[in-house]
Amino acid sequence: MDWPAVTADLEQLLKLRTIPFGMKLYEARADMEAVPRIRRPQHVHTLDQLVGQAARLGWTVGVTAEDLVGSQCRAVVGLGAAKTPEWQSGKHMTGVWFETVEDATAHQAAMHCVPDGQYEALAIGPLAAGKIADFDIALFYATPGAMMYFINGLQWSGYKKFDWGVVGESACADSWGRALTKREPSLSIPCFAERRYGGVLDDEMLMATPGEYLVKAIAGMKALSKNGFRYPFPQYGVQQDVREGMSVSYGP
């Protein structure tokens, strides 16, 4: 994957304000630590914060279970033995995000999580930095309009309807958790924790996907651009006669 070229295309087509980044899971901690000039956290963080360091500061960061604040972050990416019966019960979220323990348990069961026991470490960093050659998934933040255009690019050839869900809090399970486990594009509405601790802005959504879908979407967006469909979308006007505008695309 030519990550610098992919990044340049994404930034140009979608007018991105943050850095496209990637995640890679490692079975052995030593393999993560062997990444050139990789940063290691000096404090305990949420995974949202470490993602923010990659997307907003351009850092390549290596993560192990002890770097993360609790089992909720660890469980999504399968670090440590996070998915204990207590975690599955959701007791720590009862009365905080959910009224009853039954509600909290249902939420935990709905999350897309990498299974425990296979991986010891995770690396997160800019796609174009060149430190990690083979990311498991690529991610980027963008506005709803840019996400719609990206999806249109995915659907240009080999049309597929996308069905995504929203678990609510812990929405990282909808993005990187889902993409790592299902190996397909996964769009999310970032949750409170991502916005409070990860620096995600009100108008940002998150796409996580295996890299080959980026290439497919870029090819589709370039085809749409030739048809006059580009992001940002030019406003036509809510009181104009629509026939003149639509005739450019669809004929008289």
Image (cartoon, rainbow, N blue to C red):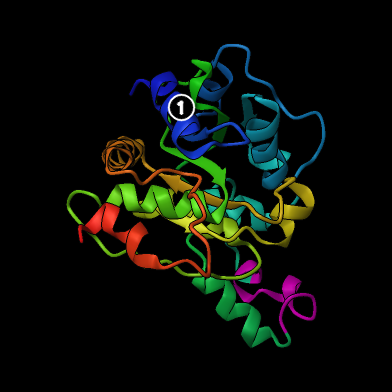
The structure residue drawn at horizontal position 33% and vertical position 39%, both measured from the top left corner, is 225
Kindly identify the amino acid type of the residue bearing the numbered disc 1. Thr
The structure residue drawn at horizontal position 75% and vertical position 45%, both measured from the top left corner, is 199
Q: Is residue 161 above or below residue 96?
A: above
Asked if residue 114 can be seen in this view, the reply is no
The structure residue drawn at horizontal position 52% and vertical position 70%, both measured from the top left corner, is 239
- Decide whether residue 208 is among the magenta residues: no
The structure residue drawn at horizontal position 52% and vertical position 55%, both measured from the top left corner, is 235
* Closest to the observer, 234 or 27: 234
* Closest to the observer, 71 or 223: 223
Q: Is residue 146 above or below residue 245?
A: above
Asked if residue 252 can be seen in this view, the reply is yes
Return the x and y of residue 41 as percentages of the image width and height: 74, 30
Q: Is residue 50 above or below residue 144?
A: above
* Closest to the observer, 67 or 10: 10
Q: Looking at the rendering, which quadrant does residue 211 occupy?
A: top left
Q: Residue furthest top?
A: 36
* Residue 55 located left or right of residue 46: left
Which corner quadrant holds the C terminus? Answer: bottom left
Return the x and y of residue 178 as percentages of the image width and height: 44, 56
Which corner quadrant holds the N terminus? Answer: top left
Q: Which residue is mark 1?
A: 7
Return the x and y of residue 251 as percentages of the image width and height: 20, 57
- Decide whether residue 87 is among the magenta residues: yes
Return the x and y of residue 249 as percentages of the image width and height: 27, 54
* Closest to the observer, 17 or 207: 17
Part of the protein shown in magenta: 86-98
Q: Secondary structure at mark 1?
A: helix
Q: Residue furthest left?
A: 158
Crowding at dot 1, Cα within 10 Å, few <14 / some 14-19 / many 20+, comes out as many
